[in-house]
């Protein structure tokens, strides 16, 4: 009998992740209980804005701490949680269990509502690099959705996760 990890990585799951990522231009993937990336739709890296914040502003540690805190919250709730990171990107995470054993998390994210870029980030960028044009352009290129669209995307994410869990993990 295959382990749950072998089952979850069936080709169909990768295809579902790829199509979801392609439709919305956002990341969807499965992460280990420790938060390690295991499978991601289209093998999509972080969006350019997030990469700039993590690498150029040295905020990767802050991002990882926030993600870890939210994964712990999702474990306590045993349900999907959605949150905004300190830079304004929206992410969702759902813990996945097999016979009460945490297998990992489905995560989706790095998109935003139609809102302005955090002024403190712009100021920090300008202090280090002068012009904030690169940061602002990267922010404007991140996927942006209305509240109604975000709710629909999150519900679709939930449906996909429930489908994958029921078809591929609970056998």
Image (tube, helix red, strand yellow):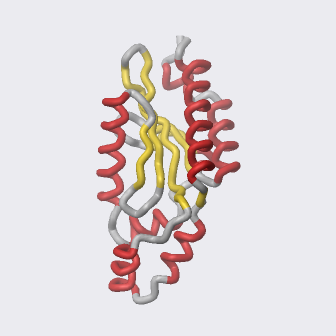
Rendered position, 150 above or below 57: above
Which image quadrant is residue 114 in? Answer: bottom right
Instruction: Identify the image quadrant of the C terminus.
Output: top right
Instruction: Please say if 44 is above or below 137.
Output: above
Q: Position of residue 111 (x, y in %)?
A: 54, 56
Q: Indicate the position of residue 7 as horizontal and vertical percent values.
A: 56, 22
- Count numbered badges in the picture: 0
Residue 65 against residue 32 in the figure, above or below: below
**Furthest-front residue in view?**
148
The answer to whether residue 50 is above or below residue 108 is below
* Residue placed most toward the observer, 10 or 16: 16
Question: What's the residue at 54%, 40% (across, down)?
Answer: 39
Relative to 62, 80 lies left or right = right
Q: Position of 122 compared to 5: left or right?
A: left
Left or right position of 65 against 53: left
The answer to whether 122 appears left or right of 144 in the picture is left
The image shows residue 68 at horizontal and vertical percentages of 32, 44
Q: In which quarter of the view is residue 100 placed?
A: top left
Q: Which residue is found at the position 55% from the left and 23% from the top?
A: 165
Residue 148 at x, y percent in the picture: 60, 48
């Amino acid at each position: 009998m295959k382990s749950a990890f072998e089952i979850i990585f069936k080709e169909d799951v990768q295809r579902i992740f790829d199509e979801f990522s392609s439709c919305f231009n956002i990341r969807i993937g499965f992460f280990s209980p420790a938060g390690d990336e295991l499978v991601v739709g289209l093998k999509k890296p972080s969006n350019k804005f997030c990469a700039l914040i993590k690498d150029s502003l040295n905020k990767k540690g802050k991002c990882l701490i926030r993600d870890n805190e939210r994964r712990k919250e999702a474990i306590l709730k045993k349900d999907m949680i959605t949150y905004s990171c300190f830079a304004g990107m929206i992410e969702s995470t759902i813990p996945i269990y097999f016979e009460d054993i945490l297998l990992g998390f489905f995560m989706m994210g790095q998109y935003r509502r139609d809102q302005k870029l955090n002024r403190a980030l712009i100021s920090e960028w300008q202090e280090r690099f002068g012009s904030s044009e690169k940061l602002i352009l990267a922010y404007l290129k991140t996927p942006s959705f209305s509240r109604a669209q975000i709710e629909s995307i999150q519900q679709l994410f939930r449906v996909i996760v429930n489908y994958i869990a029921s078809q591929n993990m609970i056998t």
